[in-house]
Image (cartoon, grey):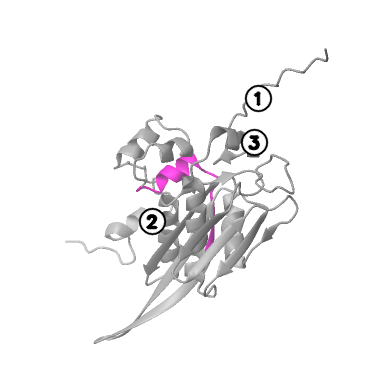
Amino acid sequence: MAGRERGGPRGRRRQFDEGAAPVIWAPKTRLGKMVKNGEITTMSDALKSGLPMREPEIVDILLPAVEDEVIDVKMVQRMTDSGRRVKFVITVVVGNKDGFVGLGQAKGKEVGLSIKRAIENAKMNMIQIRRGCGSWECGCRTPHTIPFLVTGKSGSVEVTFKPAPRGIGLATGDVAKKILRLAGVSDCWAFTEGKTKTVVNYAKGVYDALKKNAQMRITDSEMSKLGIIQGNIVIPVKEEQAAPAKTEE
């Protein structure tokens, strides 16, 4: 019986060889099947469907221009009978710079695989935020800032965002700048309380504030008055009926 040559591919290693066929996505959830069949074509429709997003491939199809950025890399250690075990906790933010943003975490023994898992978790936590011109100093009716004041909290960190006029920029901390930039916000004022040096809580507080921004109920008249867009969808402005002119007798 001839022996196998040394150095040849074994078992699962063959799927990583050059020239291997690409993996075809087979959706397992109802939302994934609807996206693949073309029943849902936008991320806004996917979020409005109310179905849980448990597959990162949904975001890859509906938002192909998503960018990611690592916010925090933390090493944790645990002493066991066999010795000291080291793991890495990665926090990542993803967004398309046009109204969609997500935050995710992952833990693993290797940094590269942990970053990949964190990106996938961030995509499954994607939300769409509202943008507009909520600053009374500006009134340009363009989606450059947040439309109203929102506050988010995580642990001891409390973050408050206020609308800013055009040209102010992101007057926030470095962590909030990364998240707001990927969310598509270019002008904003921020006020923080608590231990903001805890990067993870700071990031989660920013994400919580943006989530409240997306969940707050506002009327159609306010949306048209402030020029608010939801995600990357422009909300049509209703023309106000002009009052009849008074004629002098």
- The residues colored magenta run 54-70
Q: Position of residue 175 (x, y in %)?
A: 57, 65
Among the 4 quarters of the image, the one containing residue 235: top right
Within-10-Å neighbours for mark 1: few <14, some 14–19, many 20+: few
- Left/right placement of residue 182 relative to residue 157 reads right
Q: Position of residue 195 (x, y in %)?
A: 52, 75
Q: Secondary structure at mark 3?
A: helix
Front one among 65 and 163? 163
Amino acid at circle 3: Lys
Of the numbered discs in the image, which one, if any, rests on residue 225? 3
At 72% from the left and 17% from the top, the residue drawn is: 244
To which residue does mark 1 refer?
239
Among the 4 quarters of the image, the one containing residue 227: top right
Mark toward the start of the polypeptide (2 vs 1): 2
Of the numbered discs in the image, which one, if any, rests on residue 16? 2
Mark toward the start of the polypeptide (1 vs 3): 3
Within-10-Å neighbours for mark 3: few <14, some 14–19, many 20+: some
Q: CA distance from mark 3 to mark 2?
A: 55 Å
- Left/right placement of residue 88 relative to residue 143 reads left
- Left/right placement of residue 237 relative to residue 103 reads right
Q: CA distance from mark 1 to mark 3?
A: 10 Å
Amino acid at circle 2: Phe
